[in-house]
Image: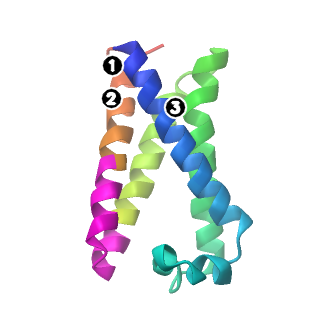
Amino acid sequence: MNIVVWIVSALLAALFLMAGSMKLAKSKQQLVADPKMGWAEPLPEGLIKFIGAAEVAGALGLILPGVFDIATWLVPAAAVGLAVVMVGAIVTHGRRGEWQNVVVTVVLLALAVFVAVERIGPQAF
């Protein structure tokens, strides 16, 4: 089961690293120009950058502490943090009627909760 948790953690880390990096690297205007990123239009640019930073930090927190066996409690903490970000994303997409995005976000939420539960409990370091 530990291998499954590592695979899910790596998948989540890759997805959140890409998504967060995009939010940090692009301006709000560039993000809103993408039809898939319309949710960003009513948000302040600082909040978008904060979300991006949280996603990047969460991605790094899912992998690096376990790889280096230092402060491994950060792995479930990062997974919980990403789950909280996903709850916010579900609310945002739901209010906008973006149901396909809600489904994807619910899956990401479930995967983050899975990693958190496993790393707190049976697959703890």
Label 3 – label 2 distance at C-alpha: 16 Å
Q: Are marks 1 and 2 in contact (CB under 8 Å)?
A: yes
Q: Nearer the viewer, mark 1 or mark 3?
A: 3
**Residue 38 in view here:** yes
Q: Residue at x 47, y 46 (%)?
A: 81
Of pointers 1 and 3, the one earlier in the residue sequence: 3
Question: Which residue sits at x=70%, y=70%?
Answer: 26
Whole-angstrom CA distance, mark 1 to mark 2, is: 6 Å
Identify residue type, mark 2: Val
For the residues marked 1 and 3, what is the alpha-carbon distance in whole angstroms? Answer: 19 Å
Q: Secondary structure at mark 1?
A: loop
Residue at 41% x, 53% y: name it. Answer: 84
Provide the secondary structure element on which disc 3 rests: helix
Give the quadrant of residue 86. bottom left
Q: Which quadrant is home to the N terminus?
A: top left
* Mark carried by residue 121: 1
